[in-house]
Amino acid sequence: MKTDARIESLLREVAPQALGALVRRYGQFEECEDAMQEALLAAALQWPEQGVPDNPRAWLTTVAARRLTDQVRSESARRRREETVAAMAPLETMVTPAADTMTPEGDDTLTLLFLCCHPALSAPSQVALTLRAVGGLTTGEIAAAFLVPEATMAQRIVRAKQRIKSTGSEFQLPPPSDWDDRLQAVLHVLYLVFNEGYTASSGNDLNRTELTGEAIRLTRAVRRLLPDNGEVAGLLALMLLTDARRPARTGPDGSLIPLDEQDRSRWHAPSIEEGLALITRTLAHGPVGPYQVQAAIAAVHAEAAHADDTDWPQIVALYELLQRLSPNPVVALNHAVAVAMARGPGAGLALLEQLATDDRIAGHHRFDAVRAHLLEMAGDTAAAQAGYRRAARRTTSRPERRYLESRADRLG
């Protein structure tokens, strides 16, 4: 069992490197990705019995290349068209290479991430394709994580690959003028994957550790490639500091435990230490970006031994900076909570009134839940109870619904 887990971890690490080498050599992202999935299946079946090869990445690339060759031969035989054979000649004439000749000169993970996060794709498609091609998750695993039928997820991934193919994109890093935007897309996708894993938007479980773990692993991979990028370091620090709370976020029955009621001795100390060190180093070298500010907020929480020790004025100041860097209603909602904790619930409720007309957040269960919490702090139990129940009706997460209903019940 331990061997299988080790092999699974190894496959997820080397698969994007092998796929990147394959696409860089042959192009045709869709065909290469399909061939790599077959190679991964072959590895999962053969390696436990025959042992892990000396060069796992080269093994995967070689087997996938053979699948491509077989595919071309089959297609050629079916169509009998000379132009098809000629167009695919590099694959048709390829002999089976030695393992070391298939080893890529560098790590293509970042290029592969950029390709999966192509601006022509929607955010859900970017997430799905990243988890499939770079994360090594099967279509079934991705579908289960997002609670959609496997056929639906398969169609989404196929459409995403076809969309990339239709753009004529080559397997190379984007031009310098597009670098910042494309990197931000990569980081945003990893951020979305982590958030969906940390607080699942629907279903029975609050956490989906396969997604948070994958987001952290991939962000580490990006940081190895871009060690001097402050926002990459900031995102990794944010993930580590946030995920460190996971052991204390749920009770034995899976019920949600809010931040101010968590047993902080159960927080994962090594993740906190790593996250604090990361954000401390990166803030000293500027310029500061949104992920670094969010990580700094998480660090303030992590440094408080008890909820009452939290430096709320500092958090208010950080949220005000974040609003200037990345204004959006979720940041404004969190800022209102921080203001309420620092200056009293009335001040926070006043800020919420300004958000009440913003359709992007006003109909969301989090807005109702925050408003109910501040009303409870202010002593308006009837309005708070109604707010908790309204939030419970709106959420699709069962742990969150149970928690909100329990808050309402507690008020009478």
Image (tube, helix red, strand yellow):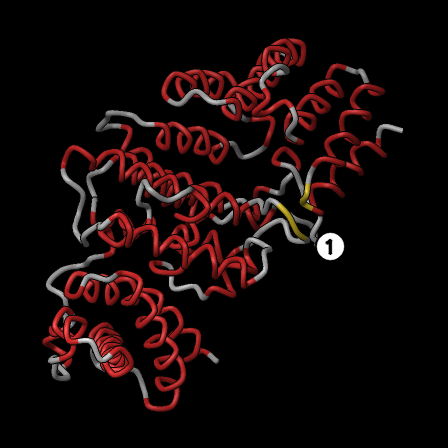
Horizontally, is 78 left or right of 311 in the view? left
Residue 364 can be seen, yes or no: yes
Residue 59 can be seen, yes or no: no
Horizontally, is 319 left or right of 334 in the view? left
Q: Quadrant of residue 79?
A: bottom left
The type of residue carrying mark 1 is Asp
- Closer to us: 234 or 196: 196
Residue found farthest to the right: 412
* Secondary structure state at the residue bearing disc 1: loop
Q: Quadrant of residue 261?
A: top right
| Residue underneath mark 1 | 253
- Closer to us: 62 or 226: 62
Expressed as whole percent of the image width and height from the top left, the position of residue 294 reads 42, 30
Q: Is residue 76 above or below residue 137?
A: below
Q: Quadrant of residue 6?
A: bottom left
Classify the position of the C terminus by image quarter: top right
